[in-house]
Amino acid sequence: MNFSGKRVLFLGAHPDDIELGCGALVHHIVKKTDVMCVTLSDNQKNPDLLAVKNEHLEAMSVLGMPKEKIVLGPFTTRVFPNSRQEILEYFLKLRKDFQPDLIFTHSRQDVHQDHNTMTDEALRAFRGITVLGFDVVRSSNGFFPHFLVEVSEEDVNKKIEALSKYKTYRDRYYFNNELTRSIMVRHGALAERPFAEGFDILRIVGSFGA
């Protein structure tokens, strides 16, 4: 799959999800494509997580994302299932405004209720568009990548640098540099490349050229 010149939409439930799931890919394609990163909750209702909004913006800056293409939505962490219709309508408006060619969102193998809700509503809102699922290891349950995208060692290092901006989560095991690198090495091995990021296939829409 050639991403060049496409409009690519990354959807995450919370600050850090997109970076954890596909930060290297974001860095790899951001200068070659029209990329938008949308996170539905900014976690600002949790007094222990007030810093993560700015940490997210700093992390996205490391990945090369223009500030105007980083969106934080109005939804409340942990209760997305109560806002299904509102999330669907939010996505439908996003579809009309951005007109994406390709969507990345949470894997079907994710057990977090917010992540599940996002994926369900994304598949409804973006019918007729390819949707791929990224893995967030802390809430993963049986994820295996069937869609692999090669990334460079520079992309890997930028992903690790971006995650280092989350001082709030510095002691969480899933922010460990060696774990982050090892996941991309493993996915690279599956693709017979040095490094890759892996996704599950939620929907592929394709056509044969002339």
Image (cartoon, rainbow, N blue to C red):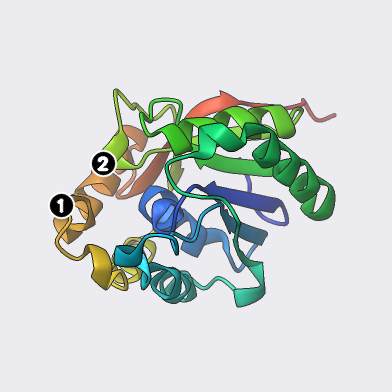
Residue highlighted by disc 1: 173
For the point 45% across and 69% down, the residue is 53
State yes or no: discs 2 and 1 in contact (Cβ < 8 Å).
yes
For the point 60% across and 69% down, the residue is 31
For the point 17% across and 56% down, the residue is 172
* Rendered location of residue 178, percent (x, y): 15, 56
Residue highlighted by disc 2: 138
* Rendered location of residue 50, percent (x, y): 38, 70
How many numbered discs, if any? 2
Question: Marks 2/1: CA distance?
Answer: 9 Å
Label 1, secondary structure: give it. helix
| Image vertical order of residue 58 relative to residue 168, above or below | below
Q: Is residue 31 left or right of residue 19?
A: right
Say if residue 197 shows up in the picture.
yes
Label 2, secondary structure: give it. helix
Q: Which amino acid does the dot numbered 1 rest on? A: Tyr
Say if residue 132 shows up in the picture.
no
Q: Nearer the viewer, residue 65 or 71?
A: 71
Q: Is residue 62 left or right of residue 64?
A: left
Pointer 1 local density, CA inside 10 Å: few below 14, some 14–19, many at least 20 = few
Q: Is residue 187 left or right of residue 83?
A: left
| Image vertical order of residue 181 relative to residue 1, above or below | below
